[in-house]
Image: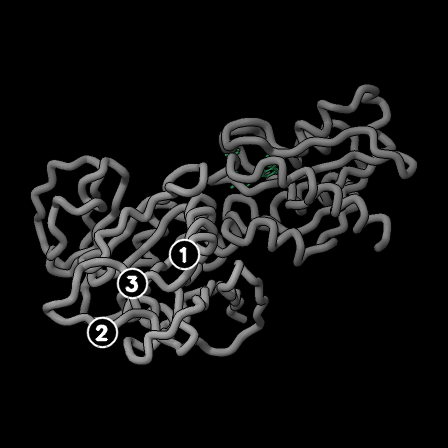
Amino acid sequence: MNIHEKYIKRCIELAKNGLGTTYPNPMVGSVIVVDNTIIGEGWHKKAGEPHAEVNAINSVKDKLLLKQATIYVSLEPCSHFGKTPPCANLIVDNGIKNVVIGIVDSNSKVSGRGVAHLKNNGCNVEVGVLEKECYDLNKRFFTFHNKKRPFIILKWAETKDGFIDKIRDENSENTPNWISNEFSQQYVHKMRAEEQAILVGTNTALNDNPSLTVRSWSGENPVRIVLDRTLKIPTSYNLLNDGIKTIVFSEIKDIENTNDTVIFERIDFKNNVPEQICNVLYTHEIQSVIIEGGKLTLQSFIDANLWDEAYVFTGNVLFNKGLNAPVIKKSSSEIKNIENDLLTIYTNS
Ligand code: AOF
Ligand code: ZN
């Protein structure tokens, strides 16, 4: 690891102090170095509050040292007047001559203009140090700005023999058939607390009457999203009745809605449903979503190649027959044990 990488790594560590509080902004860290010694550090804490570079510069006791300093930032310094003034100007105004940047900002308000401002004002600028690590740190933010859609995580549980559910008929009980163990379920609640939204199809909503909340983990509940083409889900069901925000996708026009925690969005269910959903979620500024089932909904996102990661829990049970689990294109994967369940995490490449 060279010197630049060492300090950008420190920026990434600092940035992570903002985990969970910076939305819709990214997590960003910054360090200021003179003669291989750190003289200032900062990170972005919360949208509307100062950016990482501002906090780093403010933390330097002897401001005269800034003229010989190198500033490291995990993300390109901004060039726009947003909720706060531009960091690129602040760097120039403080006489900092050397700037090392992890990755260019994808936000169309910045995207290279910060680097251009620094260079036009005589700074030496190096871009792309630990670029992949800096991307991964804010993968939701980058996916949202680059692809104009949320970061999409598929999640399901399947039996050892590859089934996602039992076959249900009219006589089936309307209860979930548990496949994964209680530790996996807790893990899912943690995932829900870390993402902004969670989506299920009509059958899952009708069969399981789920809450999709984070009961076994602390943190905020995600926005729930449900597909309900012809509005079959009873208004007494949890998703429509518990006072937590839900977005309902249907094809019904002019819905009379008196519930202010439920938002109706109309799409055409005949084709490109995942694409239309992504477009609507982008307008709601939702940067990440977990798709929790059922099979048809998961498969539609897989077929449209609209997914970034898939979390597949394999429970230690056999159904012998049932509904086959979705089929995913083999991609890079990581495996974890959760007691006697197996969690395989696929990354779409
Ligand atoms: C930086 N340093 O620490 C962060 C940056 O509304 P504002 O003024 O807070 O600007 C938000 C945008 O600024 C955000 O979308 C992203 O492009 C950039 N975030 N930039 O120079 C930081 N958090
Ligand atoms: Zn900034």
Q: Residues within 10 Å of mark 2 (few under 14, many from 20)?
A: few
Q: Which mark is residue 167?
A: 2
Instruction: Evaluate whether residue 170 shows in this view.
Output: yes
Q: Which mark is residue 177?
A: 3
Marks 3 and 2, how far apart at CA: 10 Å
Instruction: Evaluate whether residue 86 shows in this view.
Output: no
Q: Please tell me which of labels 1 and 3 falls first in the chain.
A: 1
> What amino acid does circle 2 point to?
Ile
Above or below: residue 295 compared with residue 3: below
Marks 2 and 1, how far apart at CA: 33 Å
Question: Which residue corresponds to the image point at 63% horizontal and 43% vertical from the top-left?
Answer: 114
Above or below: residue 285 compared with residue 220: below
Residue 25 spot, x, y in % from top left: 51, 40
Does the beta carbon at disc 2 come under 8 Å from ligand 1? no
Considering the numbered disc 1 on the image, is that residue within a helix, a strand or a loop? Answer: loop
State the residue in front, 2 or 169: 169
Above or below: residue 180 compared with residue 137: below
Kindly identify which residue carries mark 1.
Answer: 149
Residue 158 spot, x, y in % from top left: 39, 69
Residue 320 spot, x, y in % from top left: 33, 79
Marks 1 and 3, how far apart at CA: 32 Å
